[in-house]
Image: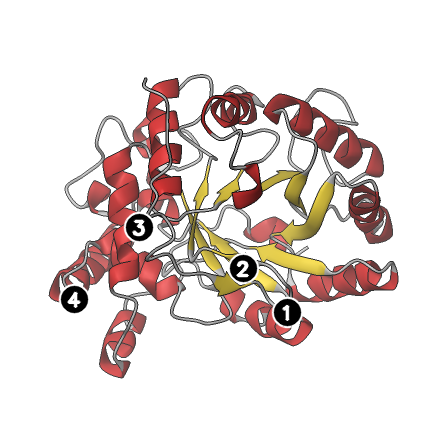
Amino acid sequence: MTTYQPASTRYEDASFRRCGQSGLVLPPISLGLWHNFGGADVFETGRAVIRRAFDRGVTHFDLANNYGPPYGSAEENFGHILAKDFTGHRDEMIISSKAGWDMWPGPYGVGGSRKYLIASLDQSLKRMGLDYVDIFYSHRPSPDVPLEETMGALVQMVRQGKALYVGISSYGPERTRQAAEILRAEGVKLLIHQPSYSMLNRWVEDGLLDTLDELGVGCIAFSPLAQGLLTNKYLGGVPTDARAAKGSSFSTELLSEDNLRRVRELNQMAQARGQSLAQMAIAWVLRDSRVTSALIGARHVKQLDDSLDALQRLDFTTEELAAIDRHASEGGIDLWRGVSTE
């Protein structure tokens, strides 16, 4: 590919949202590399998506140690893209990573121990060719590990200069409050929480968003498209290239007739608004000012552009929200509910 020069207009129409009560702002839509950027994917396709995102004002790129497949390969590929295309633009970017889920064999490659989290961040930095990440998350609560130890590891990262900010993901309201208190006692603020949130997965409305607002903590919602269910992908069945067909993290069991019926109703509402279903789903998540950013994935540039175009229509009438509420309810798709309620 030719030498990349970022669009000179990338900030002209870009908007940003304050992340809780902090000095950091994030784009309303951020790009996640959970899928489509690993060693099993086409490198140049992922590279084109990241370039396009940056050209359109997306400054936040979200990774984790085990994104791939194989594990670690998304960070490796992202590191190559940074070196090829973004060496002069690192300070324009917010780069995050996480650890908590399984990464390597044995008892020290999973969970919330200081041993695992510190080692994982060091590995992530090496894979990406970075001196620090902007945000490092405890990727999930680990009830078998003292919360003081997990938060202590995050404090250590900040003090070592390996992470500028720290966050948590999939923590319930009470554990979130406890984590924030532990960090505050050490002089480190809990910057952000990353929960799953969509029209078919509304658990954060039951106390978590109120807690984050009270604590002054930002919120970045992952899976706002319910892993693709809230797109036009499944309206006519399961396409062969879909994650559900590949038997990965999305199970065909989630494609119940009840879920599909609600998705079709929501799709009709989106069309009436002049949006794709995906665009309306993203806009709906962002309707709440307590949500700092919606974290999306993208298989190719066209899909990315469709999602980013959600920003063209973020307003909802009271009648529209009421109509959406009749169909936007729990769809049994929250794969992380167990850890969130521990």
Q: Identify the mark nearer the N-term, 4 or 3.
A: 4
Q: Which mark is residue 21?
A: 1
Q: Earlier in the sequence, mark 3 or mark 2?
A: 2
Where is residue 109 shown, x and y percent of the image? 73, 27
N-terminal label among 3 and 1: 1
Mark 2 = which residue? 25
C-alpha gap between disc 4 and disc 3: 16 Å
Residue 302: x and y, percent? Answer: 23, 37
Of residues 158 and 169, the one drawn nearer to the viewer in this rendering? 158
Which of the two discs, 4 and 2, labels the residue nearer the N terminus?
A: 2
Disc 4 to disc 1: CB gap under 8 Å: no
Can you say which quadrant of the picture contains the C terminus?
bottom right
The residue tagged 3 is 308
- The quarter of the picture where residue 114 lies is top right
Q: Amino acid at mark 4?
A: Arg
For the residues marked 3 and 1, what is the alpha-carbon distance in whole angstroms?
25 Å
Q: Is residue 230 visible?
A: no
Q: Amino acid at mark 2?
A: Val
What residue is shown with label 4? 273
In this view, 173 is above or below 263: below
In the rendered structure, are the residues bearing label 4 and label 3 in contact, judged by CB atoms less than 8 Å apart?
no
